[in-house]
Amino acid sequence: GENVEQHPSTLSVQEGDSAVIKCTYSDSASNYFPWYKQELGKRPQLIIDIRSNVGEKKDQRIAVTLNKTAKHFSLHITETQPEDSAVYFCAASKGGYQKVTFGTGTKLQVIP
Amino acid sequence: DGGITQSPKYLFRKEGQNVTLSCEQNLNHDAMYWYRQDPGQGLRLIYYSQIVNDFQKGDIAEGYSVSREKKESFPLTVTSAQKNPTAFYLCASSSAGDSNQPQHFGDGTRLSIL
């Protein structure tokens, strides 16, 4: 089955700096890669996603890049703010009704 | 997401007891999922259902059971066979079909042993 590895497990950055979280996946058939943000005690919420026919996607301060050959994808947050502090999960799936495999999460702390 | 309702928010289980966690969605989604979340281990899939009256085991199904009698409901029973049930349980749903769609999560149920 699919295996998703996520690094780092914790990340501290100064407010205004950039943060990068990296994930690798094992199944070359995976074609959908969502990223979720989970604030303490709350539900995970989708922040951005990318499909395998696209190499990069950006939404304001958040961007995701995908390298299908190397089977890795990354989340980039620029100009970080204290409200970006949360746990971020990457995930991979083969789409349709297939199950989604999540990474183990990255706890991001933005220091004011 | 107001479209997915999990109840109760907190649940306590006694030794040898089965407990059922409720998950209801009004998003008209075909697929529903149950995840277990432990600190530092991300989200692990327990069961998922792609259509009414059908469901599949996920990665950690032992000690759990589910049913999918209605499209909007996907209850999870934590049986006495699950020896370490203390965790945060999340239900999710998604519309699928031809294109990939994200999962929408409920607010979760925190289960503890008395």
Image: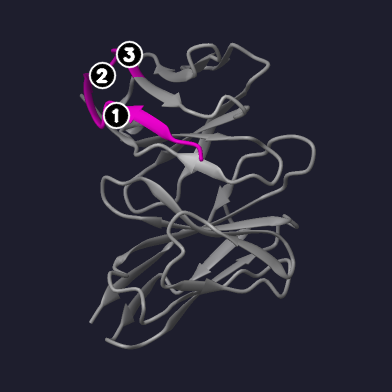
Q: Which residue is pictured at 73% across the width and 44% down the height?
A: B96
Residue B101 appears at what percent x and percent y?
Answer: 67, 39
The number of numbered discs placed on residues in the rendered structure image is 3
**Is residue A13 a member of the stretch shown in magenta?**
yes
Discs 3 and 1 lie in a common subunit: yes
Residue B41 appears at what percent x and percent y?
Answer: 31, 46
Query: How far is the residue under mark 3 from the one under mark 1?
Result: 12 Å
Chain name for mark 1: A
Label 2, secondary structure: give it: loop
Residue A7 appears at what percent x and percent y?
Answer: 31, 26
Q: Residues within 10 Å of mark 1 (few under 14, many from 20)?
A: some
Q: Which residue is mark 2?
A: A15
Q: Which residue is pictured at 61% across the width and 69% down the height?
A: B74
Contact between marks 3 and 1 (CB within 8 A): the answer is no
Kind of residue at disc 2: Glu
A92 shown above or below A112: below
Q: Which residue is mark 1?
A: A82
In this image, B47 relative to A106: left or right? Answer: right
Discs 2 and 3 lie in a common subunit: yes
Image-quadrant location for residue B5: bottom right
Q: Residues within 10 Å of mark 3 (few under 14, many from 20)?
A: some
In this image, A1 relative to B15: left or right? Answer: right
> Along the polypeptide, which appears first: circle 2 or circle 1?
2
Dot label at residue A67: none
Q: Which residue is mark 3?
A: A18
Query: How far is the residue under mark 2 from the one under mark 1?
Result: 7 Å
Label 1, secondary structure: give it: helix
Contact between marks 2 and 1 (CB within 8 A): the answer is yes
The residues colored magenta run A1-20
